[in-house]
């Protein structure tokens, strides 16, 4: 769908649902036809959130198909492959069928993505017009296993934070935050050659957590990934009663993540930490606002982040929310994925964070600015933050789904 400035809410909602229906495979929603023909983990969580108020049954099915591909160690893979569609790196690269923890009968990647799923389950339960308690109980074991995987297999530094071991796990693949860790890898070729090499190296070491701790060259504590994990721990504590479980361990987990974020990633803003280099990565990206999702973040930290977000480093110098990299950085590029363009996904997450912390003016600005993007340019993958031009592929599912939620108010 290509938008136009005068499109009204009803027409925009209808167009968004048409995109989601066209991208539905019968079991999951692909991000975009042709270019992304499989199921992506973070995309499915965001799509389920967007569908919660209008088609909760479809939202549950979206997550259920993803949980069916969960590995026995609790990892939810970042890609679940649809048969008959090409993509690189595809099943022949990941070879999930060779791993004893991988699901049988479905091919997946060997990486994960930001664990938004418990929050998505809570969101659907909270906003569904029908009783969703049964699905919460069905989803609970998968959510608990995912949490256990992150706390036992991905806390590589013993810090209380989960480490990503590949840029693809961040949800912000081309972010300049990964430039330095990638440059430290002594390999010929460009960044995409390093992407492939990292994935193959992890595969060749049997997707081993011991290998990740000792030898894997890319290990980064990402503020967005851990901010999402924290809010999913918060969600688990709220869902626990429905599952007949104790909420206390998940409240305690959220507190541990909060302390570690402040102790390890805060330096006037939240920055990613390169575990191999032993230092913060000194570039501020939209991922640095991920911890704002935490309802328990100290008020002075909330205010400092809100001021930064609205400053000329981000929203204050752009025509549309929110540039994915600070505008004054040498690495900023308005046309390259995650190095400058605005995304409906991160705008929605920051809008949620603003609502949590009662930042009403910021919430309204994020809502209005994001809806203006899709009205003008359609449901594009991302957008130029200065003139709102659509970039990347068209008919992008999370842009359509989250527009539905923004229209709900």
Image (cartoon, rainbow, N blue to C red):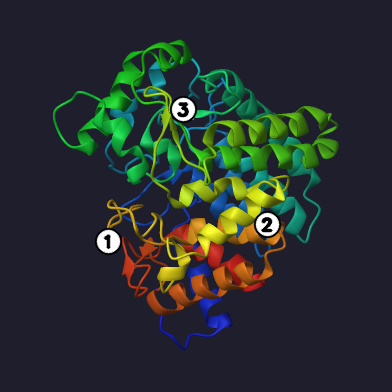
Task: Reply above or below: 23 against 220.
Answer: below
- Give the residue at mark 3: 105
295 vs 279, left or right, is right
Rendered-image quadrant of the C terminus? bottom right
Q: Residues within 10 Å of mark 1 (few under 14, many from 20)?
A: some
- Give the residue at mark 1: 335
Toward which corner of the image does residue 72 lie, by quadrant? top right
Q: Nearer the viewer, mark 2 or mark 3?
A: 2
Relative image position of residue 193 (x, y in whole percent): 20, 33
Residue 86 showing in the rendered view: yes
**Residue occupying the far bottom of the picture:** 6
Rendered-image quadrant of the N terminus? bottom left
**Mark 3: secondary structure:** loop
Q: Earlier in the sequence, mark 2 or mark 3?
A: 2
Relative image position of residue 162 (x, y in whole percent): 54, 28
238 vs 72, left or right, is right
- Give the residue at mark 2: 56
Give whichever of 296, 337 is nearer the camera.
Answer: 296
Residue lying at 52% horizontally and 43% vertically, measured from the top left: 270
Q: Which mark is residue 318?
A: none
Residue lying at 40% horizontally and 31% vertically, measured from the top left: 109
Relative image position of residue 406 (x, y in whole percent): 60, 69
């Amino acid at each position: 769908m290509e938008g136009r400035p005068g499109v009204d809410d009803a027409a925009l909602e209808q167009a968004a649902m048409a995109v989601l229906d066209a991208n539905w495979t019968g079991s999951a929603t692909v991000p975009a036809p042709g270019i992304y023909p499989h199921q992506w983990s973070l995309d499915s969580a965001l799509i389920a959130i967007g569908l919660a108020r209008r088609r909760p049954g479809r939202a549950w099915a979206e997550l259920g198909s993803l949980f069916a591909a969960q590995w026995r160690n609790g990892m939810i893979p970042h890609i679940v492959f649809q048969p008959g569609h090409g993509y690189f790196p595809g099943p022949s690269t990941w070879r999930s069928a060779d791993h004893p923890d991988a699901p049988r009968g479905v091919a997946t990647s060997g990486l994960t993505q930001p664990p938004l799923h418990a929050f998505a389950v809570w969101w659907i339960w909270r906003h569904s017009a029908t009783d969703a308690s049964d699905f919460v109980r069905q989803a609970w074991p998968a959510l608990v296993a995912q949490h256990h995987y992150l706390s036992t297999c991905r806390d590589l530094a013993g810090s209380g934070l989960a480490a990503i071991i590949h840029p693809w796990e961040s949800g912000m693949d081309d972010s300049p935050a990964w430039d330095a860790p990638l440059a430290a890898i002594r390999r010929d070729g460009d960044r995409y050659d390093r992407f492939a090499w990292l994935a193959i190296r992890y595969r060749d070491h049997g997707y081993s957590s011991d290998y990740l701790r000792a030898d894997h060259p890319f290990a980064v504590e990402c503020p967005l990934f851990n901010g999402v994990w924290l809010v999913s721990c918060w969600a688990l504590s709220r869902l626990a009663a429905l599952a007949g479980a104790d909420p206390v361990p998940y409240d305690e987990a959220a507190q541990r993540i909060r302390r570690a974020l402040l102790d390890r990633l805060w330096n006037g803003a939240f920055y990613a930490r390169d575990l191999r280099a032993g230092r913060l990565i000194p570039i501020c990206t939209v991922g640095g606002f991920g911890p704002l999702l935490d309802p328990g973040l100290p008020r002075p930290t909330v205010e400092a982040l809100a001021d930064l977000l609205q400053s000329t480093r981000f929203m204050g110098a752009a025509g549309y929310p929110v540039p994915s990299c600070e505008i004054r950085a040498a690495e900023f590029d308005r046309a390259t994925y995650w190095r400058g363009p605005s995304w409906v996904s991160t705008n929605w997450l920051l809008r949620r964070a603003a609502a949590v912390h009662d930042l009403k003016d910021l919430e309204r600005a994020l809502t209005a600015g994001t809806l203006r993007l899709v009205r003008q340019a359609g449901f594009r993958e991302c957008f130029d933050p200065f003139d709102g031009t659509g970039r990347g592929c068209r008919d992008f599912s999370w842009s359509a789904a989250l527009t539905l939620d923004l229209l709900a108010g």
